[in-house]
C-alpha cells in the first residue's frame, strides 16, 4: 500500500485567505469564462436570473423544491454534511460512485484516519489526483476574490490583464449587491459575494455526523469552527470544482462507472446548496471550471501541463513536512499509468475483473433512470435564459471547444475526437444560461456528460462486438 500521507490546512483551503499571486494564463482564461455572472445586473434578463438564483437556492436548501435526489431529503442532508469535508488527497469521499463492490475495494486502501492523514490506492493514482486537483483548484480559487472585489486575496489588486476582464459593464460583488448584502455591511462577507447562509431569508440548519462520524452541525461548516466561510466569497464553488474534478478522474480511471461518477459529481455540487454554502450559479460555475481545465489537461495543452505545483497528495511520510513539487508534461501518459495501477488494485480488492465488480452495485446509483433524472435536474437548475442568441441553437463543440471531446475519448478510446465532439454537440443541455454567451467556456456550461457518456459507451461496445465477430 502507498504509505501514509499527510496534508495540512490545504484541506480547508476554502476557509483561508488565498495566496496573493498573479493570475496564470490558465487562470485568466477561466476568469474570462466565468465573468458573465458579473454582467447580470446590466440587463432585465440578468436581473431575473439573479432573482431566480436566490429563489431556487433557497427552495433546494429548505427542501421546498422536490428534487429527484438519489436519497430521501433527510438522508441527502446528512450526506451533504459529510460532503463538507474535502477528501482531495485520494477522492475517498466520492468513490461511492464506483458502486458498492468497487467502492469497498477502493476505500479499503484510500482512507482518511483524521483531517490531515490519509492513504492512497497507489502512487500513480495519487499523482494523477494531486496534479489534476491542483490545476483545477487554481482556476477556481482565482475567481473567489476576483469577482468579490477585484483582488487576489481580498486586499491585493489583481494584475492589469485580469482587471481588463471586468470591463464592459462587469461589476464585483454581484450577489451582495443583488441580495442586499453589499460587501462589509452587517451580516455580509467582508470582501463581497456573500453566501446563501448570509443572504437567504430562511436557512434550514440541522445536526448530524461529519465525515468521520463525529457529532456535527451544518452551521459548523458555514460559520465555523469546522470551516469558517463568513468572509470567503461564494463564486465559483471550490467544493464543486473539486467534486467534478475528482469524480471525473475516477470516471476516466474506471470507464464502466463513468455515468455514475458524473451523477456523483452532480450530487456533490448539489449538496453544497443543501447545506447552505453555495448558490446554484456557484455550482454551475464550479462545474464548468472543472470540465474546462480537465479537457485542456487531457489535450496536453501546454498552458495546463508542464506546470510545477506544490502537490500534497504525493508526499510520503518521510518528507511530509517538506515541499514536494510535481511537473507533468504528458497528462495522458500519467492517466494511463494511473489506470493500470487502479485496475490492478481494484481487481485484487474485489476478487474479480473491474468490469464484473462494476456491475455489482446495490447502492443509490444502481438505477440509471434515477441517475439521469437527477443529473438533468442539475443541468441548469431551471434558471431563466440570459443569452437568447444561444438559447435556440445547437453549438458546434468541434468548432468552439474541440478539446472537449477528450473528456469522452480518454474513457472510450474506440471513438475518434470528431465522433466524441459530435456526441457532445448532439447531447448538449439547454442553451442561453448565464454562462452560455457563445464562448468556449459557455460550451462547457452546457455539456451533458451523463447522456453523452451513455452514447459513447454504446458506440464503443458496438465496435468491440463488431470487431469480435470478424
Image (cartoon, helix red, strand yellow):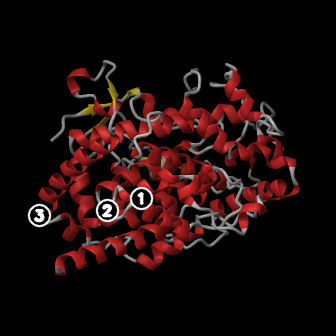
User: Label 3: few (<14), some or many (≥20) within 10 Å?
Assistant: few
> How far apart are the two marked residues, 3 and 1, measured between alpha carbons?
34 Å
Which residue has dot 1 on it? 417
User: Label 1: few (<14), some or many (≥20) within 10 Å?
Assistant: many
At 39% from the left and 28% from the top, the residue drawn is 8
At 49% from the left and 38% from the top, the residue drawn is 137
SS of the residue under disc 1: helix
> How far apart are the two marked residues, 1 and 2, measured between alpha carbons?
17 Å
User: Label 2: few (<14), some or many (≥20) within 10 Å?
Assistant: many
At 50% from the left and 55% from the top, the residue drawn is 80
Q: Nearer the viewer, mark 3 or mark 1?
A: 1
Percent coordinates x, y for residue 241 in the rendering: 51, 46
Q: Is residue 86 left or right of residue 292?
A: left
Q: Nearer the viewer, mark 1 or mark 2?
A: 1
Percent coordinates x, y for residue 175 in the rendering: 76, 44
Q: Earlier in the sequence, mark 3 or mark 2?
A: 2
Choose between 111 and 236: the one closer to the eye: 236
Q: Is residue 406 left or right of residue 69?
A: left
Q: Earlier in the sequence, mark 1 or mark 2?
A: 2
Percent coordinates x, y for residue 194 in the rendering: 71, 40
Q: Quadrant of the C terminus?
A: bottom left
Choose between 125 and 206: the one closer to the eye: 125
Quadrant of residue 425 within the rendered picture:
bottom right
Which residue has dot 2 on it? 255
Q: Is residue 1 left or right of residue 238?
A: left
Q: Nearer the viewer, mark 3 or mark 2?
A: 2
- Callout 3–callout 2 Cβ contact below 8 Å: no
SS of the residue under disc 2: helix
> How far apart are the two marked residues, 3 and 2, measured between alpha carbons?
19 Å
Which residue has dot 3 on it? 351
SS of the residue under disc 3: loop
Q: Earlier in the sequence, mark 3 or mark 1?
A: 3
Amino acid at each position: 500500500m502507498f504509505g501514509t500521507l499527510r496534508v495540512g490546512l490545504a484541506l480547508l483551503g476554502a476557509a483561508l485567505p488565498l495566496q496573493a499571486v498573479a493570475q496564470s494564463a490558465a487562470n485568466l482564461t477561466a476568469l474570462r469564462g466565468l465573468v458573465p455572472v458579473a454582467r447580470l445586473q446590466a440587463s432585465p434578463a440578468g436581473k431575473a436570473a439573479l432573482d431566480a438564483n436566490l429563489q431556487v437556492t433557497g427552495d433546494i436548501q429548505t427542501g421546498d423544491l422536490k428534487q429527484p435526489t438519489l436519497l430521501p431529503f433527510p438522508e441527502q442532508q446528512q450526506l451533504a454534511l459529510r460532503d463538507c469535508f474535502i477528501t482531495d488527497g485520494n477522492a475517498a469521499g466520492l468513490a461511492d460512485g464506483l458502486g458498492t463492490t468497487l467502492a469497498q475495494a477502493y476505500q479499503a486502501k484510500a482512507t482518511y484516519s483524521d483531517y490531515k492523514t490519509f492513504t492512497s490506492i497507489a502512487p500513480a493514482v495519487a499523482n494523477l489526483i494531486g496534479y489534476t486537483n491542483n490545476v483545477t483548484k487554481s482556476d477556481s480559487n482565482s475567481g473567489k476574490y476576483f469577482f468579490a472585489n477585484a483582488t487576489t486575496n481580498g486586499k491585493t489588486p489583481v494584475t492589469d490583464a485580469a482587471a481588463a476582464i471586468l470591463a464592459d459593464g462587469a461589476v464585483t460583488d454581484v450577489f451582495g449587491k443583488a441580495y442586499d448584502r453589499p460587501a462589509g455591511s452587517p451580516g455580509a462577507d467582508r470582501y463581497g459575494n456573500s453566501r446563501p447562509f448570509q443572504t437567504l431569508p430562511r436557512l434550514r440548519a440541522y445536526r448530524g455526523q461529519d465525515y468521520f462520524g463525529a457529532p456535527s452541525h451544518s452551521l459548523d461548516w458555514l460559520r465555523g469552527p469546522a470551516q469558517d466561510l463568513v468572509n470567503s466569497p461564494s463564486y465559483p464553488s471550490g467544493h464543486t470544482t473539486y467534486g467534478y474534478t475528482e469524480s471525473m478522474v475516477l470516471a476516466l480511471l474506471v470507464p464502466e462507472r463513468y455515468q455514475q461518477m458524473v451523477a456523483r459529481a452532480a450530487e456533490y455540487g448539489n449538496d453544497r446548496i443543501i447545506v447552505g454554502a453555495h448558490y446554484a450559479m456557484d455550482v454551475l460555475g464550479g462545474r464548468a471550471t472543472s470540465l474546462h481545465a480537465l479537457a485542456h489537461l487531457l489535450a496536453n495543452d501546454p498552458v495546463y501541463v508542464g506546470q510545477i505545483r506544490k502537490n500534497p497528495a504525493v508526499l510520503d511520510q518521510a518528507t511530509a513536512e517538506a515541499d514536494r513539487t510535481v511537473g507533468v508534461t504528458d497528462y495522458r501518459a500519467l492517466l494511463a499509468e494511473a489506470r493500470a495501477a487502479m485496475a490492478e488494485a481494484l481487481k485484487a480488492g474485489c476478487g474479480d475483473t473491474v468490469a464484473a465488480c462494476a456491475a455489482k452495485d446495490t447502492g443509490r446509483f444502481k438505477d440509471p433512470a434515477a441517475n439521469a433524472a437527477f443529473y438533468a435536474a442539475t443541468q441548469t437548475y431551471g434558471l431563466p435564459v440570459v443569452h437568447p442568441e444561444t438559447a435556440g441553437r445547437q453549438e458546434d463543440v468541434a468548432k468552439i471547444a474541440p478539446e472537449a471531446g477528450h473528456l469522452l475519448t480518454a474513457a472510450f478510446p474506440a471513438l475518434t475526437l470528431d465522433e466524441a465532439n459530435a456526441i457532445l454537440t448532439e447531447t448538449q443541455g439547454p442553451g442561453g444560461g448565464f454562462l452560455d454567451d457563445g464562448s468556449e467556456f459557455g460550451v462547457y456550461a452546457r455539456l451533458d456528460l451523463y447522456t453523452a457518456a451513455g452514447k459513447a459507451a454504446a458506440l464503443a461496445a458496438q465496435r468491440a462486438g463488431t470487431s469480435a465477430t470478424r
